[in-house]
Amino acid sequence: MDEASIQTKMQQVVNLVTTDIASIRTGRASPALIENINVSVYGGQQKLKIQELATISVPDAQTINIDPWDKSIIGEIRQGILAANVGMNPSMDGNIIRISLPPLTTEDREKYTKLLSAKLESGRIMVRQVRADAMHDIKKSFEEKEISEDEKFGQEKAVQGITDDFIEKIDTLGDKKKEELLQL
């Protein structure tokens, strides 16, 4: 496994973590909280994400508006949000769906901080797994006498350096999200 493929795999992990933690609610409204919720529409014939069905806007820090392009499915979108059980109560206001987010309580903040920590640790584990696979490949190459001992140590050091960089990226993402969570 070369360095470029290791970096690509680790970047995919960071992208996954970024998407995953975007769905954690902070004190502010954000389209990321609902855009990836799957909704059964057109009589259950199709499952689409809300971002594929409507325009999502955030008029203020506590409100999310969903404006479906096809007004006939507005009820199905509302039911999909309720069924997703994400703790939001959508209400229909004419041709749009409005979600008012109550301010986070201290317990909510603690719960979301724990959830954030779990998601970040899961990302770190995935990065370490990529590192373990790369180290295994290096060891195998050394045992088959394809590389020298010096090359083995050099490659292991390079893989560890890449791993440290990506763990740091995940930690930075986590710090930013935690800061958003703890803002009052």
Image (cartoon, grey):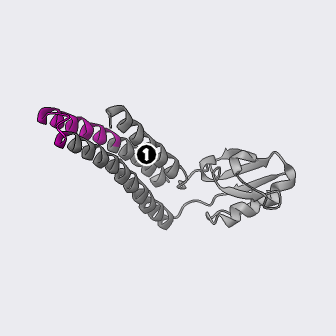
Q: Position of residue 10 (x, y in %)?
A: 39, 42
Q: Quadrant of residue 79?
A: bottom right
Coordinates of residue 53 in the picture (x, y in percent): 75, 48
Residue 165 forms part of the magenta stretch: yes
Q: Percent from the top left, x then y, of residue 129?
A: 33, 51
Q: Is residue 37 left or right of residue 119?
A: right
Give whichever of 1, 35 is nearer the camera.
1
Q: Is residue 167 magenta?
A: no
Q: Nearer the viewer, residue 183 or 90?
A: 90
Looking at the image, is 99 positioned above or below residue 151? Answer: below
- Residue interval drawn in magenta: 142-166
Residue type at mark 1 is: Val
Give the residue displayed 22% in from the left and 35% down from the top. 155
- Which residue sits at x=70%, y=51%? 50
- Of 153 and 176, nearer the camera is 153
Most distant residue in the front direction: 144
For the N terminus, the image quarter is top left
The image position of residue 68, as x and y in percent, is 79, 48
> In the rendered image, which residue does mark 1 sit on?
13
- Left or right of 42, for residue 35: left
- With 155 as the anchor, is 40 left or right in this view? right
Disc 1: CA contacts within 10 A as few (<14), some (14-19) or many (>=20):
many
Classify residue 176 as left or right of residue 23: left
Residue 178 appears in the rendering: yes
How many tags in the picture?
A: 1
Q: Residue at x 58, y 59 (%)?
A: 103
Determine the image quadrant of residue 131.
top left
Mark yes or no: residue 94 visible.
Answer: no
148 vs 109, nearest the viewer? 148
Q: Which residue occupies the extreme left position in the image?
A: 149
Magenta segment, principal secondary structure?
helix
- Secondary-structure class at tag 1: helix
